[in-house]
Amino acid sequence: MSSEKTPEAHRVPRSLRDLRKTTLRSFAVGFFVAGLLLLGFVTVRDQEREGGLPRLLRASHELGGKAWSRLFDPARSPPIRGAPPGARTRLNGSLGLKSPIDLRAWRLRVYVEDKLVLTLNQDEIRWLPRTDTATEFYCVEGWSTHFSYAGVRFSEFLKAFGLSERHSYVGFETPDGEYSVSLDMQSMLHPQTLLAYEMNERPLSLEHGAPLRLVVPVKYGFKSLKRIGLIRLSDIRPKDYWAERGYDWHSGL
Amino acid sequence: MGIRLKHSRPIRWSHWLNVPILGLMFWSGHLIYWANDVYLSAPATVYETLGIDHRLAEGIAWHFFVQWLFIINGIFYVVTVAVTGHWRELLPGKGAAREAWLVLLHDLRLRREAPPESGKFNGAQKIAYSGIIVCGAGSVLTGYAIHKPVQLGWLTSLLGGYDSAHQIHYWLAMSYAVFFVIHVTQVAKAGWNNFRSMITGYEFRKDA
């Protein structure tokens, strides 16, 4: 027996005929709401797409990303976990790596908005202050791996060439332009974010992004672009391959 | 005998809204799990026939949107249960485990007599309906441990790490599927009068 003494107790049906009426009414309300929910779902599903997602879902991702950006503790890092020297790290993704590359002719081009401000070769990058570190590394597919890596901290890269930290976004593209990522400056300034040329104490292999790759452990792995061709500092969000294909642009961890 | 209120309006709304909400979470969750080879336990053609392959981004988008509805509905339900005193009927007490065992034996037709009525819910129901709240909270916690393993690294660690959080999250989801099958079977067995009480709130009782 129910122990509730809610106002509903006054509206108890007094006969089976009343109960039948109540039942029909309840079913009608239920089916009406179910219809509304179905209509809502179909409306969202068929909405105009923004970056491969229905507008409401894209807005939901962006809102979540902005909210988390405010709440983020910039000092937090993933666990620092390396691998034995020369260990093979799990590989995923070959976008932008399919065309042949001449490592000695390779140059890193740095743009501020549309202006080319810097061109560097591999040696010039290796002269910059070197950082050795390691990280747990997460894939959007749900698995994680870990490796050690070495290169120049992005924050120190900016400092070395007098480039401003005050741009909102940093964009990266492979030399052939096939793959691109962009990130918020806050994540780029994280101490574990490196332009890397070594992994597991060996020079970067071609499949892992030689001669230079991005490693940004506070984001899903697909933001760590391999084989950097250009870097762009901008206040307009640069293009991002997976964000155009339905993934959350923020993807912060 | 007469007609009595068995389930209040907040309880009924929360219960039925959870059907599409949890359904969407379960479906979108599978779009996500398809992408992780740890969980692929069926041949590729099964997923393709169900149409859930290659839709990771879509799965993530729906999952992260509907989770708000799941959390709000869950909090609404727990607060309702606490504030109305309904928890007294839900929480299993001292004899609940033994009663649940007797209920199980009776349901499997291994014991002729049903255990005597001990309230709105029998021991097995109390354990199941209280346990499912804990599971729901567990899904939210493991979900966030997976979603923010850096910012909520302490939580991810507490759950045994990234992979462990994933496993717990997955098995909790599977437990909802098992719960659903048993629950729907029991509801069907309990008959129209009982089912109607979760629609209208009222049941007809010969002893009321």
Image (tube, coloured by chain):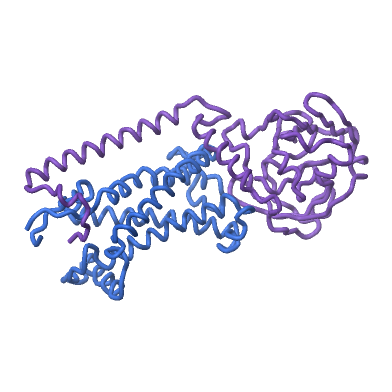
Chain colours: A purple, B blue
Residue in view at x 69 percent, y 41 percent: A223
Q: Nearer the viewer, residue A61 or B109?
A: A61
**In this image, B104 relative to A158: left or right?**
left
- In which quadrant of the rendered image does the N terminus of chain A lie? bottom left
* Mark count: 0
- Please tell me which residue lies in front, B186 or A193: A193
Q: Residue at x 86, y 28 (%)?
A: A117
Residue B107, x across and y down, in percent: 23, 65
Q: Is residue B131 above or below residue A108?
A: below
Residue A133 point in image, percent of width and height: 79, 55
The answer to whether B131 appears left or right of B29 in the picture is left
Q: Position of residue B142 (x, y in %)?
A: 52, 56
The image shows residue A25, relative to residue B88, as above or below, that is above
Residue B11 visible to the viewer: yes
B118 sits left or right of A198 in the view: left
Choose top left, top right, bottom left or bottom right for residue A29. Answer: top left
For residue B49, side relative to residue B191 (left or right): right
Residue at x-position 55% and y-position 45%? B35
Q: Residue at x 39, y 44 (%)?
A: B21
Residue B31 percent across, percent down from the top left: 49, 42
Q: For this rendering, which residue is in front, B72 or B169?
A: B72
Please indicate, yes or no, whether residue B46 appears anywhere in the rendered image: no
